[in-house]
């Protein structure tokens, strides 16, 4: 099962097991001297969470916060953080047979943050390995968040 969301007009998916909730964007408090990809922090029911601008993290620009923007709250190992995205889509069950590896031409050598591409009717969903995408923020090699459908 995948939780899907948008960055620009493209749809991305992550393993739903790592998604705690999807929230509207409220107040994000900037933090001085935070890493460039950290948009700031939010208060989630008394817990302070860092918010990663996922577009910036992936080198796609910055999320421009609109009414459609969302914070995808994820848990990897014992860490909880928010991912700022352009919009949330849905939770989908995707057959393993519909997932193909990403073409070699679109993935840098050694970058395994894109696990594959799911083909569903008239749309493609880029599957992210959250553990690898967020490895620096998690302070680890990033093998925990592998996407499996």
Image: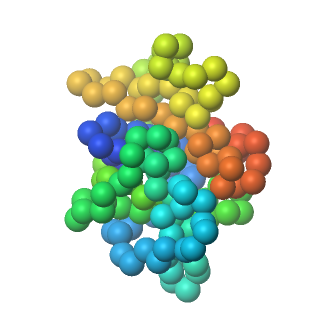
- 141 w.r.t. 66: above or below: above
Quarter of image, res 112:
top right
In the shown orientation, is residue 139 left or right of residue 54?
Answer: right
Outermost residue on the bottom side: it is: 46
Rendered residue at 57%/74% (across/down): 32
Q: Position of residue 89 (x, y in %)?
A: 31, 48
Total number of numbered discs in the rendering: 0
Res 58 seen here: yes
In the shown orientation, is residue 80 left or right of residue 144?
Answer: left
- 18 w.r.t. 107: above or below: below
Between 99 and 25, the residue placed more toward the observer is: 25
Between 2 and 30, the residue placed more toward the observer is: 30
Outermost residue on the front side: it is: 33
Quarter of image, res 109:
top right
Rendered residue at 23%/65% (across/down): 67
Between 18 and 97, the residue placed more toward the observer is: 18
Q: Position of residue 46 (x, y in %)?
A: 55, 86
Rendered residue at 32%/37% (across/down): 10
Rendered residue at 41%/41% (across/down): 60
Res 90 seen here: no
Figure coloring: rainbow
Outermost residue on the right side: it is: 140
Q: Position of residue 72 (x, y in %)?
A: 45, 59
- 6 w.r.t. 32: above or below: above
Q: Position of residue 106 (x, y in %)?
A: 47, 19
């Amino acid at each position: 099962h995948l939780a899907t969301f948008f960055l620009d007009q493209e749809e991305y998916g992550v393993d739903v097991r790592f998604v705690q909730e999807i929230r509207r964007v409220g107040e994000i408090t900037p933090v001085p001297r935070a890493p460039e990809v950290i948009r700031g922090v939010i208060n989630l029911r008394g817990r302070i969470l860092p918010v990663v601008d996922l577009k910036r993290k992936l080198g796609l620009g910055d999320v421009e916060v609109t009414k459609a923007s969302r914070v995808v709250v994820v848990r990897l190992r014992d860490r909880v953080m928010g991912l700022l995205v352009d919009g949330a889509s849905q939770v989908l069950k995707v057959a393993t047979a519909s997932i193909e590896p990403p073409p070699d031409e679109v993935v840098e050598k050694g970058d395994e943050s894109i696990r594959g591409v799911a083909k569903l009717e008239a749309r493609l969903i880029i599957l992210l390995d959250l553990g690898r995408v967020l490895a620096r923020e998690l302070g680890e090699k990033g093998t925990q968040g592998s996407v499996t459908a």
